Image (cartoon, rainbow, N blue to C red):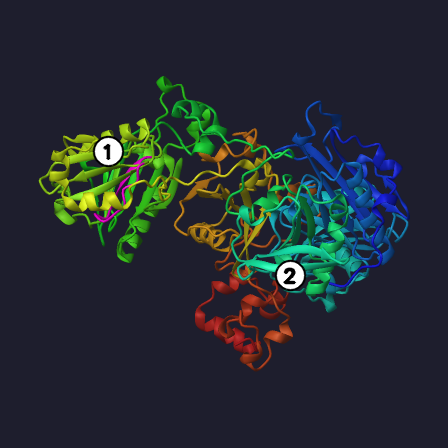
Amino acid sequence: MAKDQKRPIYEDIKIDTAFRKISPKAIGFHVWRIQNDHVEALPKEQFGTFYDENTYVIYSASLAGTISDKNTICREIKTPMGVIERYIHFWLGANITSDRSKSAAYKIIELDLHLDHKTTQYRESQGHEGIRFLSYFKEDGILIQSGTDPSSYPQFPRLYQIKGKTTPQCIQQKAITWQHFNCGHVMILQTPTILFVWVGRTTSSCERLFGLKIGTKLKDSFKIPEMAVVDDGYEQSMSADRKEVWNGFLSLSQRFVQPMALTPSNADIVLKLYQCDTVNGVFRVELVKTGALEQADLYGRDSIYIIDYMCNGVWIWIGRSSHKQNRAEAMRHVRGYVIKKGYPASTPVARVIDGLEPAEFTSLFPSWISSDVNGNSIKGMSEKFDALTLIQRPKLAAQIQLMDDGTGDATVYQIGAEDVSEIPKKHAKTFYSGNCYIVHYQISCTSENNISSLSNSIKNVIYLWVGSNASMEFRQTGEAFLAEMCSHLKKQVVQVRISEGMEPPHFLQIFKGGLIIFNAKGSGGEGIMNIRKYPSSFVLKVVGNSTYSCKAVQVSSKTLYYPEDCYILKAPDNEIWIWCGQYSTGDSREMAKSIASILGEYNLVMESNETDEFFNSVGEKFLKQLKKTHGSIVTPTMNVAQTWEKQRIGLYMCSLEQEKFVLSKIFGFTQKDLRPENMFLLDAGNIVYVWVGEFVGTDDRSQCWELAKYLINTHPVQRDINMPIAVVRQGEEPITFIGFFDNWDKKYYENYIPFDKIRAELESPGGTTPVPVPRGSVHSDSATGEDFDRYQKYPLDMLRGGDATNLPASINPTRKEVHLTHDDFVTVFKMAFHDFEELPKWKQVELKKQNKLF
């Protein structure tokens, strides 16, 4: 990279007076507007309002694990500085000058210097803000005005565009034209007499509700007499008076609405790691790794690395012992890298300091051991918890993933190619990898157990366990039976799909840690009701050391025997032995004895104290394998996957854009983020939950499993595609789910008011005739069925074109009519779509031919 002659002289930096008022030992939230060579603090009531020709500095300081926003009360923290997390953002409007951009870069160096370089820095560009920045303004959204201040543009008329599925932004447009209209946005047309809220067909519930909220705010602020809601494609349904006003600013004869823009996919983006150095004043980078990263890749306390995630952001990591000049110049260097690579100017960049890495950064790594600024490792909890105690403490229940203590009733079914058979309880703990099983568990919630009322949201858990060697026929039958059982139970049920080797703790707890998995295919048909025969000889490796982490898995007779483990062997002479390695724990040995007792009477031997009787029984093969691993103390990992710490757990809102999944991550999530119109994914590390809102349509509910798999496949960290997936419905959340949310309120949704109800209340007082609401528009943000208003819309002239090969690929030439707007459809066919659908097919074809749409 070229040498930059305009480097700031570190020793000469003078800290702005406004920044000096900030105590490094205080938490709080501050916003400053940059004015020439100084900054001007904004009052709290202006937080969230920006002007596109300005630059701003935002500073958020909070206790570790929490988030500060505009409602945070500034106060001193009388504890070591390491517990405070500090974030500096500088926000650049879309129409700023280069001088304003440079001023912002200098100002964050000043603030960072004042805070002793113990901050994470972000460069935010209008329309490309990061998830942490957006989280500060989730409650009221973001308003972006044109110019530099309120007097930059006249009050009337104005056109605003609203977009953003999680934190909506209301952005003033410089020109009033149809070119800004997109079916994926909400638009606000502000006139002296009527404020119009135009609702795009594919907008999310969050965008629609924010449109009404900001529309009401603008109406009251500018004293506009009336507010009207207009639906995409239903503009001609407005009253004559409203159409006259609308046409005065936007002619309906020139109406053209852009199709929804596709959100870029992360599927093909590969992480790249570069090591950086400065040689003779020139900043250089060298590629050292491509693909999955590990925390160990960032080594050296005075090292500098760049992590390139392309359009998702570029990070520069600074070693904690690196010179302060490197910390001060890091953002300049990473911006130079972005320019050199030819990435868009809006590409997010951030600087992180070793030991102060934020959650967005650590989530790029499969695991991350946090440490404080002094290099002290933060220890995780390893103590054991009683299951009943966890039920009364949802946060701990979520961490360890136990819904109850496993004392409820459990029924196990074996899946055949076409039938399902119940397994007698005395054989229900033995599974075979060639089969699939359904486990119907009824939650134990008796008053004697003194269980918290939080556990009463569900009564049934249905697990589908899929063996590693199960046929596709078995899998499909199992999935169908799972759906049938959930439909039969109707309510208060959670369904979970798990694969062999990925069993979650509660599933193992149901079997009291006694689940046995054999490689052979189990018996089927009528024989399932008879006593099932175990293999004549086998070796089981005992995995785990508690009832919620333990199982026994058959391994090859040629396996290596490790001294930390316990093994159960059935010898050719039918004797059952437990072999315990010299480093095995007492808990592991107790679990091994519990499992062996299921198989029959057993003998126990310890490594190095084996008897001749033992060796004669198990044979020379065991002795030969034992010698191969003599002295080894390393065991291959076969334990239950750990739940991520709270900061790494991700919540994603799900939507469909032109039949493609789009996941929007929500930072600092709360229960309020779970909207009844949507489906959400909660990624806890060892399990993915699919939360289904009350208003989600039937077609969308069928996509829940595929949504979870899509997240697993596209996550920046390589994940096991076989990890457990659980589906929960609104109002039926298990404590293992709600424990990830602070202050969960079971009655929260009783007061939830959907978009249509708010809209009806707004339109009713004036006595005006409401604009017809598109059918099915309220309940789901991602409908894909035979819903007229969910089809992509195109101009009438385009659809009437003669050559079908010139039409977009999404158009079925025999169904062109569904791609008309409501207004065009009524104009052409003289009836509404639902009336047209009731006509005989021959009549429909005749009308389409008459109107050149067939």
Q: Helix, strand or loop at disc 1?
A: loop
Q: Is residue 558 magenta?
A: yes
Q: Residue 353: x and y, percent?
A: 67, 43
Give the left or right position of residue 271, taking residue 343 as reference: left
Residue at horizontal 53 percent and vertical 74 percent from the top? 848
Viewport quadrant of the N terminus: bottom right
Q: Which residues are magenta?
A: 550-563
Residue 375 occupies which quadrant of the picture?
top right
- The residue indicated by pointer 1 is 608
The amino acid on which the numbered mark 2 sits, given as a three-letter code, is Gly
The answer to whether residue 12 is above or below residue 582 is below
Residue situated in front as seen by the camera: 106 or 161: 106
Residue 312 visible in the snapshot:
yes
The answer to whether residue 481 is above or below residue 824 is above
Q: Residue 575: x and y, percent?
A: 12, 36
Q: Helix, strand or loop at disc 2?
A: loop
- Tell me the chief SS of the magenta region: loop
Residue 528 occupies which quadrant of the picture?
top left
Residue at horizontal 84 percent and vertical 38 percent from the top? 42
The answer to whether residue 374 is above or below residue 152 is above
